[in-house]
Amino acid sequence: MNKSKKIFSGMWHNALLILLAVMMLLPFTWIFSTSLRLPKDSFKFPPNFLPTSFHFENYTTVFQTFPFLNFIFNSLFVGIVAGIFNIIVTTMAAFAFARIRFKGRGPLFVIFLAGLMIPMQATIIPTFIIMSKVKLVGTLWALIIPAMITPLSIFLVRQFMMTIPKSYEEAAYMDGANRFLIYLKIILPMSKSVIIMTSLINFLFNWNNFMGPLIYLSDWEKMTIPIGLRMLQGYQGTGSISVIFAGVFMSIVPALLLYLFGQKYLVKGAAISGLKS
């Protein structure tokens, strides 16, 4: 009887998970379906979930109407370059807060974490003034430099590094390693999961960032994906909904593939990074 109960319970859980998975996939399926139909078919009532005819020309229209490949390249450039610098800054700061004892470390870290309570909208004006003083407004570097430092990433990586036993450092010191070698050869490799987790979060934020490009960029050739999708809507939303959804689907694919690649690191990093305070 107990065995049959376990089997029934397992089947119930699997059915529930399958139902939740289908519900999660429905919006993506609807976006892809709408991108393949004629615009008039999207407003039929009752709506057809699957298209009755497939119009792949909607995807070519995206590239014919706007320099969409250029938008993708700009978003990738911002996400990758900002991500590389963010990893360097985040891991160094987290290593200092987690593994180096210096005067005022605790209060300084608390003050630093206060940055988590300040929304980006509150700092956009002083950041814009700084970028204009150094003549970076209108360039992609105006998006990259503010994204190099993220307090949340430093907090998560610091929490993870604090779980690494001190014995690794002590053994390295006995072998003659200095602090930088310990950071580079021991702490970084052991923190791979949380570093990948924070890198994915930051990349997705930069990929979907709408406010930054809207404020800092004015050159058409330097626009990113979110601004490009907004332009597809046309004046007062008169753009083809099928073409808009074709652009939306193409913008989702890179982020979705990246998430599927790093899913295990997201779960592992989120699980371990909060074990020790």
Image: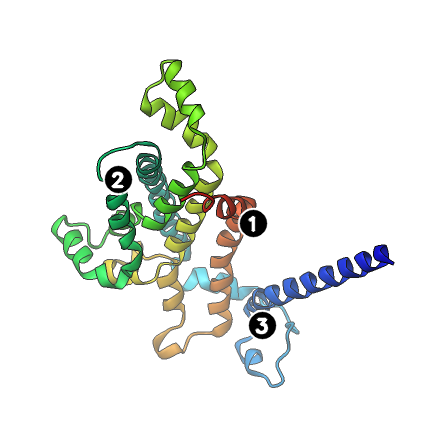
Residue bearing mark 2: 105
Q: State left or right for residue 187 relative to residue 220.
A: right
Label 2: few (<14), some or many (≥20) within 10 Å?
few
Q: Which residue is mark 1?
A: 260
Camera-nearest residue between 97 and 1 = 1
| Quadrant for the N terminus in the image | bottom right
Residue 275: x and y in percent read 47, 44
Residue under the image location 28 percent in, 45 percent down: 109
The answer, for residue 89, to whether it is visible in the render is yes
Name the secondary structure under disc 1: helix
Residue at the location (35% across, 63% down)?
Answer: 227
The x and y percentages for residue 193 are 49, 39
Q: Quadrant of residue 95?
A: top left
Where, quadrant-wise, is the C terminus in this rendering?
top left
How many marks overall? Answer: 3
**Pointer 3 residue:** 37
Give the secondary structure at mark 2: helix
Residue 175: numbered disc = none
